[in-house]
Amino acid sequence: MITRVVHAIGGTFILGSLLLGIYINSNWFWLTGLVGVNMWIHALTNWCLMEKIIKKTGIKNN
């Protein structure tokens, strides 16, 4: 369950920052890059900050 929530939040951040970058200001593309860097860190080290935050909210991993 936690993995699905992390992916949903990541996808929301990516799509939201792309829309903001296109329609508001191109500096929002930095957020897209930061999400991408976090995904690489998770893939290489199996550590994810968003996962730690979600676990503190009480969502259990099934």
Image: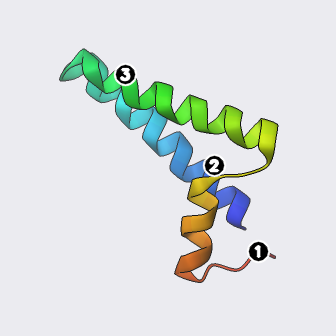
Residue 62: x and y in percent read: 81, 76
- According to the image, label 3 marks what residue? 29
Q: Quadrant of residue 32?
A: top left
For the point 27% across and 28% down, the residue is 20
Report how far apart the C-alphas of labels 3 and 1 lie in the structure: 31 Å
View extreme (front): residue: 45
Secondary structure, mark 1, is: loop
Residue 7: x and y in percent read: 63, 49
- According to the image, label 1 marks what residue? 61
Relative to 35, say whether 18 is above or below. Answer: above
Residue type (three-letter) at the residue carrying disc 2: His
Q: Are marks 1 and 2 in contact (CB under 8 Å)?
A: no
Q: Earlier in the sequence, mark 3 or mark 2?
A: 2
Report how far apart the C-alphas of labels 3 and 2 lie in the structure: 19 Å
Image quadrant holding the N terminus, namely bottom right
Residue type (three-letter) at the residue carrying disc 1: Asn
Q: Are marks 3 and 2 in contact (CB under 8 Å)?
A: no
